[in-house]
Amino acid sequence: MKEIITIQGLEKNFGKFQALSDVNFTVNAGEVVGFIGPNGSGKSTTIRILLGIIHRDAGNAKIFGKDVWKESIEIHKRISYVPGDVTLWGSLTGGEIIDLFLKLHGRGDKQKRDYLIKRFELDPKKKAKGYSKGNRQKVGLIAALSTDSDLYIFDEPTSGLDPLMEAIFQEEVEKIKEAGKSILLSSHILSEVERLADKVVIIRQGKIVETGTLDELRHLTRSTVTLATEGDVAEMAGINGVFDFKQKDNQATFSADNQYINDILMEASKLGVKKFESVPPTLEDLFMRHYEG
Amino acid sequence: MKEKFAGWDTLFLQYLKRDLKKIIVWVLGLGLFSAAFVPAFEEIAKGQGLLGMYETLLNPAMIAMVGPTPIEAAVDYTLGAMYAHEMLLFCGLFAMVVAALHVISHTRKEEDLGLTELVRSFQIGRQANSLAVMMEILFINVILALFIGGVMMSFGVDTISVEGSFLFGASIGMAGILGAGIALVMAQIMPASSGATGSALGIIGLLYIVRAGTDVSNVDLSMINPLGWTYLTYPFTENNWIPLIFALIFSLMMMVIAFRLEGARDMGSGYLPEREGRESAKKSLLSVRGLFIKINKGVMISWLIAFVIMGAAYGSIYGDMQTFLGSNEVMKDMFTHSGISIEESFTGTIMMVMMSLVSILPIAIVNKLFSEESRLHLSQLYATKVTRGQFYWTSIGLAVFAGLAGILLAAGSLGGTAIASMGDKLTMDIFDFLAAGFNFLPSVLFFTSLAALALGWAPKLGKVVYIYLAYSFLLNYFGSILDLPEWFSKTAIQSWIPKMPIEEFDALIFIMITVISIVLMILGYLGYKRRDMIEGA
């Protein structure tokens, strides 16, 4: 598969503070990668390096096989970007700013712009200083979504948007995804990443701590199982791969290590299964596991 | 009533605490600048110094710059008289500007930033903030006035009396209160803080220029100018306290008007209406140049208008010069002997003053690129095919253009008005004025290039360029009054440039400074191209 973004051993220091110490990941063609991590973990710094806004101190970063610093302009012709905090010129209207962005990008679609303005319910005639945080964000999103690019980079794109608008954003991103574009989506709204991303990269304190498809990551973690049996459910507590066992009457809830799921099922069937529910771990669980431990 | 101002005392104390450092710098800086030059003036006054200075300062160009003196005979021109004459107007003007900026930063600016919204959610009255800021201004300026009076008195000079010292201090303090009053009104009228700052400074500038005209033509008319109520107190000579009473009444009126206006408007809006904007952009906006023109338009237009007014104001003085000479034998002799006409001498001096002011605009435009950068306005644009070179050179190009336009308008308006007011009697034509103006182009470019260099390598130092500009301006301003050593006055870039039309054009200097400026701009570009963009820092 063709690699769109390739990052190897990326490092960045701000004075004595080491913002990135070892960042490695790739984004392949047609892939949506969720880039998650808490505030200050280095998401935006990584993205700024990718955009050639700041230098890297070590490592390699390429987009479309081109160096992100030296050949940034070539790269920029084929990407769209929305910063996490869209700030606008107070004296211009939203409509004017979107037009400007489209023009400077070079591959804007006027019809899509009008369509998105309607969809996102933005008043394009209003001066930007009168916009709320969410409306400013919409301006950035509309500008990026109505351009034709090969790679879209969104840095916490839905901050400040209400849930309805968030859903519209997700639908629009899905359309881009279906069109075969690559997307790097930095976020801490996990449901969003869960819905859209093929692959998740988790960053913590400037280091990538986990990379993989959601399935792969889930495999490493435990599902929550609710089990009711005819026999004594307490026998399940001693089986390998069962954790946090809690029993209420003849029903038990426990976490099950996914690699032992077969053993667990076999043991359970000996007891006569009346009810078996398994909930896969949410990204939230993954996230918490990484940040707690 | 109580409701509106509830909690102002809390805010007032809070401001004093928060601004403590600023207040110390303000009082010490402005206070010492106003009061501490007494020993330096004693030096000047030695021997025939006072007499010579008296004659120099009777030149209308000088009166236009520093103001008038009530003294009618050179023998009465004491050290105190000279000190007040040369220093008071300027220090008062400074006090006004500083106070005006302070008021807007605590009122309209905080409103724009959303701080006011937060504050008002507590048990704080709607107008408590404005009252607190005005009380702070009052407090600071009273301290400043007493400080200046105390320092001046402490030098123990005969002609600098106790009453005069405190009147001098009080005049400067009152100037601050006046400036604050004007700013508070503008903060209500304008739709945003930038407009409030611009218009308040514009009004102060206009008052200064109008008084330049009335001081030369008819000093009595300066008494209806609020700025006049500061320096027309004539400390150490007439010790006239009455103008301060006018100033106090005027300031109170301003405050009442401002409170009325504030009470009747919604937070975050002004009285000048905001029109509904365009649904889609005009073609002219759709480029980096179009965008930069748009975001600098307000600043550019207001400064260019200011340059025209300034030129016209100084130009209108020309007509009065001959009448003035007719009444003063000494000055008449001075000019007939030197073979230079009074108009030419005036042009040389005033052009330097105006071109220093013209330099502000290009510096502001170059610095704007960094303020756009740090406000994150450009984040989304960095990710487009626009190169850093385009950002940089578009800004520099716009700045240079603004500089050229500024020189053209200032010099053209000075010349045009001068010719209109004198007709055939004037020995210079419009091209002499334009030549004298464009002669200073290298200095304007030099300031632009310093700002460019800062933008590329140490963008936070961009504001320091203003300080250097102010320094060179003061050096030239006072350099013509004080006798400074050559090397010292040469630290100001304008001093290198001959003052046309009195002096000859120097092509070598012109080209050299221009080339140095271009080199600095290129150096700035090299830095800008390779540095990290500073976002939100």
Image (cartoon, rainbow, N blue to C red):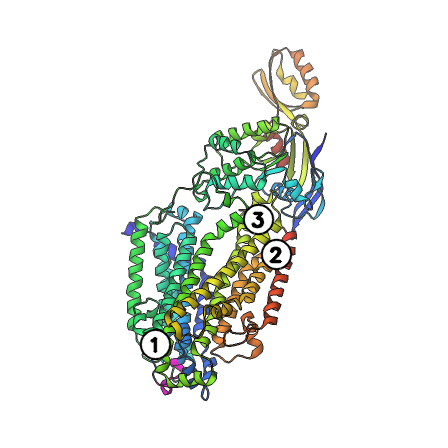
Magenta residue span: B73-81
**Distance from Cα at disc 3 to Cα at disc 1:** 51 Å
Q: Main secondary structure of the magenta part?
A: helix
Q: Is residue B226 above or below residue B191?
A: below
Tell me the quarter of the picture where residue B234 sits.
Answer: bottom left
- Give the mark nearest the N terminus, 3 or 1: 1
| Kind of residue sitting beneath label 2 | Gly
Q: State whether residue A230 appears in this view.
A: yes
**Residue B34, how many percent across, how many down?**
43, 73
* Residue identified by numbered label 1: B234
How busy is the neighbourhood of tag 1: few (under 14 within 10 Å), some, or many (20 plus)?
A: many
**Residue B291, how many percent across, how many down?**
52, 47
* Residue identified by numbered label 2: B456
How busy is the neighbourhood of tag 3: few (under 14 within 10 Å), some, or many (20 plus)?
A: some
Chain of residue at mark 3: B
- Give the mark nearest the N terminus, 3 or 2: 2
Look at the numbered disc 1 and give the secondary structure of its residue.
Answer: loop
Spot the residue most to the bottom.
B47
**Distance from Cα at disc 1 to Cα at disc 2:** 48 Å
Chain of residue at mark 2: B
How busy is the neighbourhood of tag 2: few (under 14 within 10 Å), some, or many (20 plus)?
A: many
Viewer-side residue, A65 vs B6: A65
Residue plotted at (42% across, 70% down): B91
| Kind of residue sitting beneath label 1 | Tyr
Tell me the quarter of the picture where residue B201 sits.
Answer: bottom left
Q: Tag on residue B535?
A: 3
**Residue B362, how many percent across, how many down?**
52, 59
Q: Is residue A170 above or below residue B387?
A: above
